[in-house]
Image (spheres, rainbow, N blue to C red):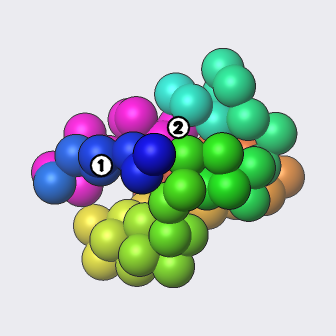
Amino acid sequence: MEYELPKDPIILLGMINMKLRDFYNNMDALCDDLELDFESINATLIKAGFVYDAKTNQYHPL
């Protein structure tokens, strides 16, 4: 089942960071489990001014 993502990039950021913090060790695990497209999420969040940091497993401001 594909997960419905929020359209607002700030809400998307909060949702992704919460799931990474509470349930997943990395973006690959999150995307695989929820059947999400990493490239699409990453592009949306980069456009909004955020970048994924694998070391902290969170999106942070650019």
> Is residue 60 found left or right of 24 in the rendered image?
left
Amino acid residing under circle 1:
Leu
Q: Nearer the viewer, mark 2 or mark 1?
A: 1
Q: Which mark is residue 16?
A: none
- Residue 11 highlighted magenta (yes or no): yes
Compared with 3, 18 (above or below) is above
Amino acid residing under circle 2:
Asn
Please give the name of the residue rendered at 55% of the width and 46% of the height, measured from the top-left corner.
Answer: 34
Q: Which residue is at the front of the view, 59 or 24?
A: 24
Q: Quadrant of residue 49?
A: bottom left
Q: Residue furthest top?
A: 22
Q: Quadrant of residue 21?
A: top right
- Residue 35 highlighted magenta (yes or no): no
> Is residue 40 found left or right of 36 in the rendered image?
left
Is residue 10 in sight in this rendering? no
Please give the name of the residue rendered at 16% of the width and 54% of the height, measured from the top-left corner.
Answer: 7
Q: Which residue is at the front of the view, 27 or 2?
A: 2
Q: Could you say whether the residue bearing mark 2 is in a helix, strand or loop?
A: helix
Q: Which mark is residue 17?
A: 2
Q: Are marks 2 and 1 in contact (CB under 8 Å)?
A: no
Q: Position of residue 29 (x, y in %)?
A: 75, 49
Is residue 26 in sight in this rendering? yes
Q: Which mark is residue 5?
A: 1
Q: Residue furthest front?
A: 1
Q: Could you say whether the residue bearing mark 1 is in a helix, strand or loop?
A: loop
Q: Position of residue 59 (x, y in %)?
A: 55, 52
Compared with 49, 8 (above or below) is above
> Is residue 34 found left or right of 45 in the rendered image?
right
- Residue numbers of the magenta segment: 8-17
Q: Position of residue 57 (x, y in %)?
A: 73, 46
Q: Position of residue 36 (x, y in %)?
A: 50, 60
Dominant secondary structure of the magenta stretch? helix
